[in-house]
Amino acid sequence: MTVDSIRNGIVIDHIENGKAMKIYQIMHLENLDCPVAILENVVSKKQGKKDILKIDGHIPFNIDLVGLVSPEATINIVRDAQVVKKVKPELPTKIEGILTCKNPRCITSVEQGIRQAFRLADKDKLEYRCVYCDTKYSE
Ligand code: ZN
């Protein structure tokens, strides 16, 4: 697998197998008008199987969201068919407006118009907690 099918864009490589669609959703790639390719079950020597996401265009996005879904992923910035930059995502310390609190008594469930917000509570366990009610985030 090479990146030559993309001239200018972003290739997210080494995504944990089965997680590419989740990244697609969390980054709202369905709203883009540039081509997006999702490759699943790509055989990798290092990981066994992996997913790859190719975005044929430069889009503003929060790289750290990728880390939330698949911390091992690598983000390759491609210009003129060359990888000009490789970025490793970091876990965001705060996530706003993306994850939803499942606690029915949380203020974000009870009242409308309150922005969902989660903070990174445990980096090793990838644990996020609601900033309002401290409920642990689960899918
Ligand atoms: Zn909450």
Image (cartoon, rainbow, N blue to C red):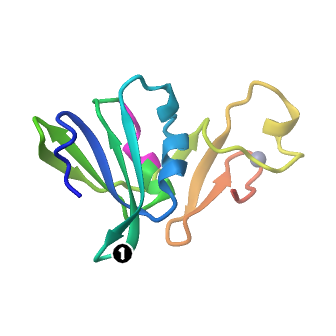
Circle 1 sits on which residue? 47
**Residue 24 higher or lower than 114, as above or below:** below
Tally the marks: 1
In the rendered image, is residue 55 in sight? yes
**In the image, 129: left or right of 9?**
right
Q: Position of residue 40 (x, y in %)?
A: 44, 58
Ligand 1: does it lie within 8 Å of the C-beta at label 1? no
Q: Position of residue 49 (x, y in %)?
A: 40, 71
In the rendered image, is residue 93 in sight? no
Look at 74% across and 47% down and name the residue there. 101
Look at 49% across and 43% down and name the residue there. 24
Badge 1: residue crowd in 10 Å (few <14, some 14–19, many ≥20): few
Look at 16% across and 47% down and name the residue there. 85
**Residue 104 higher or lower than 137, as above or below:** above
**In the image, 128: left or right of 42?**
right
**In the image, 83: left or right of 114?**
left
Q: Quadrant of the C terminus?
A: bottom right
Magenta segment range?
60-65
Q: Quadrant of the N terminus?
A: bottom left
67 magenta-colored: no
- Can you tell which quarter of the image residue 134 is in? bottom right
Q: Position of residue 26 (x, y in %)?
A: 54, 42
Look at 31% across and 71% down and name the residue there. 44
- Can you tell which quarter of the image residue 81 is in? top left
**In the image, 134: left or right of 55?**
right
Q: Position of residue 17 (x, y in %)?
A: 47, 65
Residue kind at label 1, given as amino acid type: Gln
Secondary structure type for disc 1: loop
The answer to which of 21 and 134 lies nearer the viewer is 21
